[in-house]
Amino acid sequence: MEETYQALRSDWFGGSRDRETALHLLFLSWWHWAEPEFLTGLTYDPASAELWHEVFNHFGGQASEDAEFLFVAAIMAGITPWAFGDENEWTAAAAAMMAHARSLQPDELSPGVFEGRSAYGDYFAHQSRVHSGEY
């Protein structure tokens, strides 16, 4: 996993801003704080929080019109709101992003949307199943 993260970081800082790179990098930069190293295989990166915010802003943040991005960012913010800043603000932001995702794509983001897209896809296919009634 560490090699994938480092390759995505390198691509990002090299100017690659394609959607798939950005989504995977958003996930892996968040995973640094969401789970311990022994589970993720990711070594501590003090710049991962700043990188997450950079990718988040690249998508337009809460005002984004990308339903998939909003869904995954809402999941991340909902799980670890304390990691982004003010916990209450990010809990509210997570709810707002999920609502905005629903307004953009009223049909669920099904697990099939995520399957076959490496660790990012595995993680959010599962989350899609868990949140299917909420989306």
Image (cartoon, helix red, strand yellow):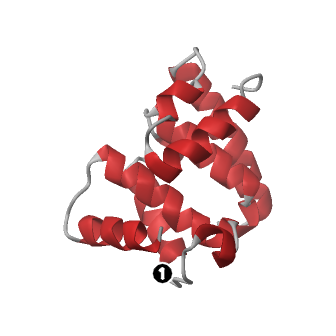
In this picture, residue 10 sits left or right of residue 73:
left
Q: Amino acid at mark 1?
A: Ala
The answer to whether any part of residue 85 appears in the image is no
Q: Nearer the viewer, residue 62 or 77?
A: 77
Residue 131, image x and y in percent? 73, 32
Point out residue 106 in the picture as x, y percentages from the top left corner.
58, 15
Which image quarter holds the C terminus? Answer: top right
Residue at the (41%, 68%) spot, across then down: 5
Q: Residue furthest top?
A: 107
Q: Is residue 100 above or below residue 107?
A: below
Q: Position of residue 13 (x, y in %)?
A: 26, 71
Q: Is residue 117 in view?
A: yes
* Residue name at image x 79 percent, y 57 percent: 88
Q: Residue at x 33, y 53 (%)?
A: 21
Q: Residue at x 42, y 47 (%)?
A: 60
Residue 40 sits above or below residue 24 on the image:
below
Query: In the image, is residue 39 above or below residue 73?
Result: below
Q: Secondary structure at mark 1?
A: loop
Q: Which residue is mark 1?
A: 47
